[in-house]
Image: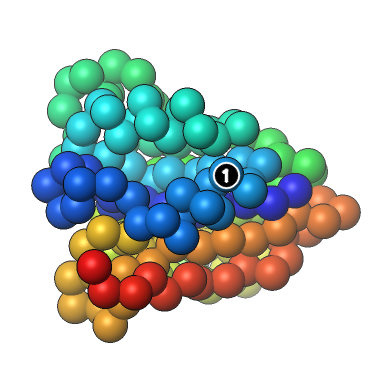
Amino acid sequence: MRLVLTSDTHLPKRARDLPAALWAAIDAADVVIHAGDWVDVAALDALEARAKRLIACFGNNDGPALRARLPEIAVAELAGVRLTVIHETGQSTGRTERCAAQFPDTDLLVFGHSHIPWDTTATTGLRLLNPGSPTDRRRQPFATFMTAQITKATLTDVTVHNLPPR
């Protein structure tokens, strides 16, 4: 199962559209995961139209229209991997073990908010991934998104994709 992970798209404030490389990855993916801060309902509509399956939550910059359509925390099982998607996880210090305690029945936690790619594994085995932002790199050298695979109920091939400057 091919996954695309993205967050903090902030359309149309940070960009008019998603980068072409991200759209290509979305078109090839079996599941797209978005960890909030869409900003505009049109972005959600566009992803729903192109993604084979979308699992998503709202973020702190998402207004009432997006909050009416998306949960604060999304939960799913993908080919034997228990997934949780949330926008904010709090400060980075202690995040991995704090989230492991908060989400004991989760194998993979995808989050956003910081715009900083993150990949750690808790002592419990919980994998935490933040794909960064494809449109607003903030203090990072690149705007980013992630891809991954699920094979035999195991997350594999997690890759951070650096996007060219706009």
Residue appearing at x 35%, y 19% in the figure: 69
Give left or right: position of 34 versus 25.
left
Could you say where residue 163 lies in the image, as x and y percent from the top left?
A: 38, 71
Q: Judging from the image, what secondary structure is the residue with disc 1 in?
A: helix
How did the renderer colour the structure?
A: rainbow
Single out the residue that lies furthest toward the bottom: 141
Q: Find disc 1 in the rendering and name its residue.
A: 27
Could you say where residue 22 lies in the image, as x and y percent from the top left?
A: 45, 55
Residue appearing at x 57%, y 44% in the figure: 27
In front of the other: 26 or 63: 26
Give left or right: position of 153 versus 104.
right
Residue 27 position (above or below residue 119)? above
Q: Amino acid at mark 1?
A: Asp
Residue appearing at x 39%, y 46% in the figure: 35
In front of the other: 98 or 164: 164
Quadrant housing the C terminus = bottom left
Could you say where residue 6 lies in the image, as x and y percent from the top left?
A: 42, 53
Residue appearing at x 63%, y 47% in the figure: 29
**Snapshot quadrant of residue 14:** bottom left
Give left or right: position of 83 versus 13.
right
On the question of residue 95 being in view, the answer is no
Q: Residues within 10 Å of mark 1 (few under 14, many from 20)?
A: some
Residue 22 position (above or below residue 159)? above
In front of the other: 42 or 76: 42
Give left or right: position of 63 versus 146.
left
Could you say where residue 45 lies in the image, as x and y percent from the top left?
A: 36, 26
On the question of residue 33 being in view, the answer is yes
